[in-house]
Every structure is written in C-alpha cells, then in structure tokens.
Amino acid sequence: MSTSYEAAGVDIAAGERAVELMKSRVARARRPEVVDDASGFAGLFDASALLRYRRPLLATSTDGVGTKVDLARRLGIYDTVGHDLVGMVIDDLAVCGAEPLFMTDYIACGKVVPERIADIVGGIADACALAGCALVGGETAEHPGLLAPDEFDLAGAGTGVVEADGLLGPGRVRAGDAVLAMASSGIHSNGYSLVRHILATTDLTLESRPAELGRPLGEELLTPTRIYSQDCLALARAGGVHAFAHITGGGLESNLARSLPGSLDAVLDRASWTVPPLFEVLRAYGDVARADMDTTFNMGVGMAAIVAADAADAALRLLEERGVPAWRLGEIVPGTGTARFS
C-alpha cells in the first residue's frame, strides 16, 4: 500500500498558505539594513551598518515563552504569545545596552493551521516593529504524532550591537546609585507552570471574573509582555545609567543580583509600589507563600534600571514621557552582591 508525507500528517500546502498569510505583517518588521534573499533560506543583514561603531560588540539572546502557550491554545488567542517572545528575547539584549538589530523565530506544531501560524508570526512581527528590530526569518515545523494537532511551541533568537565602551553591567554600578523600577504589564512569560497548577487544583478557571480584575482571568493572563528595549536605549542615551535587570524567571531579587558586583547590594523598598491585583488573586487562590511568589513572578516590576543618584529624577521623567510607569525602588549599598528587601 502506498503512502505519502501528507498521510504521515505533514501538510506542505498548509505551510505555504501560512507563509502567504503572514507576509504583509512580517514586511512591517524591517530595518533599512535588511537585504532580501530571493530563496528565503536565510535572512540577510547588511553588516556595513556596524562601521559607524568604533568597536562594535554583537549581543545575542534566545528564549521562548514557556507554558504560557498552553493558555493561548486553550483560549484560542495566538497573536499575544508572539509579542511575548519578542519581549523575552529582545529585552534581554537591552540589559547590556545593545540596540536590537534582527530576530528569527521557530514554531513547532502538531498541525499547521495557516491562520494560527499567521497570528503567531504576525504578533512577533508587530512586536519587532515596536522593539526597533527586523524579523529576518523563521521556521515552522509540523510534528504530527509528537504534538497533538492543537499543540505548539515557539522560540526565537535575537542579535543586537553595543559600543564596547558603552557596555552596561555590574562593573559600572557604584554605592549610592538609585534602583528604578519599570512596571510590568502583567505576569509577562514566567511562572505559568505555577499558574496552570493553581488552575488545575482550585476552582479558579480561565473564565473566572475575580472582582479585583474586572475582566476574565484568561484575558488578564494573556496580557502581552511589555517591551522595554527602546525605553532602555533612550535612558542609556540620556546618560547616568549603569545597569539594567530584566525581571524574568527567579523574580526581582534574583535577577537584580545578576547586575551587581560582588561588593555591592541592592536594598529594595517593598512599600514603594502596590503589587497588581492579579498576583494577589493567584496567591490567595493557590495559598502561595510570599517567598514563592517573589521567586516565581515579577510582582509588577518588569525591568529595573540602576542609575547614578543625580540622574534618577531625570530618568523617571523620561520614562513618564515615554508612557512607562516607573518609580524609585531602592538604592545600592556596600554588601556581597545580593538584592534584598529592606
């Protein structure tokens, strides 16, 4: 009996249809340095753009969005997780002061549904445009038998550039520096395994409407990750920034500690902000200890900046002008390289 690739579960025509559907949105995520490759096998970027740098350092990052994709699947909403992917990858580049140049994506699915793939990639492209980087290529792979028809996962990689003498990080941090917080838009893309556990073990559902939220829990949980790259670059250009910390897995204390030298601590004021109600809803329903909340979620802080004390007020004004809620979170003091709440 004869067989075929389609009989094995791979639909090449559906993949080609997905590519056609996403083309117009991907076209918006370009930079002048992008060079078209007619074959489509590679993404091309004109590296002569780097000649304007005295000593350019390339920065690269790769990530995914974790089990948040399961909630997207259950709710049938696919464009937001593409946005999340860009936030997770490109904002990591921003930590060292790098300007994002380009990104690629990879989607694995049990069955190619062209409209679903186009929504995912369209979300990636839209977010790349916000982040100021180009989406130069990607891959969609159909894995029948390994993934169920409605299951998928996605990952991406990004590349940026920073002038060597403009590299930000622990070596620039000084005692007396101010720690500034930039508000998150929600949970972003970390901690969803705990969220899913709470949903599986309590009467909380994606359709629940806790009074504190004012809308269904599922909508709140799929709020796209705030993208900070252009805001961080604006702060760096303004001067006085010594380091950033992207608050992802591990929470505020763990991620801030990565941006500190071994001789300094970040002392944080828990009373400096009100934790968004979503986190309290999850804590209360799941009976989650505060320590576990702190090490799992961003608790309302998506990015932190460590700036010279005399630059803090100007930095906060700049962030306000850019529409980013921000506040003074703490200060840098002599210590052993840890971040802690006072």
Image (spheres, rainbow, N blue to C red):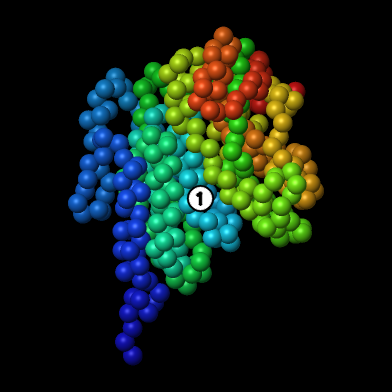
Most foreground residue, 298 or 29:
29
Determine the residue located farthest toward the bottom in the rendered image: 1
Q: Position of residue 224 (x, y in %)?
A: 54, 44
Q: Is residue 70 visible?
A: no
Location of residue 71 by image quarter: bottom right
On screen, residue 88 versus residue 43, left or right, reads: right
Q: Position of residue 140 (x, y in %)?
A: 38, 59
Residue drawn at (22%, 45%) of the image: 36
Q: Point out the image quarter for the C terminus.
A: top right
Location of residue 183 by image quarter: top right
Most foreground residue, 291 or 33:
33
Query: Alpha-carbon neighbours of circle 1 within 10 Å: few (<14), some, or many (≥20)?
Result: many
Location of residue 176 by image quarter: top right
Q: Position of residue 31 (x, y in %)?
A: 30, 36
On screen, residue 124 versus residue 245, left or right, reads: left
Residue drawn at (58%, 13%) of the image: 313
Most foreground residue, 265 or 318:
318
Q: Point out the image quarter for the N terminus.
A: bottom left
User: Regarding mark 1 in the picture, which secondary structure is present there?
Assistant: helix
Q: Position of residue 290 (x, y in %)?
A: 76, 39
- Does 277 sit above or below residue 23? above
Q: Say which amino acid is labelled 1.
A: Val
- Does 342 sit above or below residue 284? above
Determine the residue located farthest toward the left in the rendered image: 38
Q: Is residue 301 visible?
A: yes
Residue beneath label 1, please? 81
Residue drawn at (66%, 26%) of the image: 339
- Does 130 sit above or below residue 67? above
On screen, residue 139 versus residue 148, left or right, reads: left
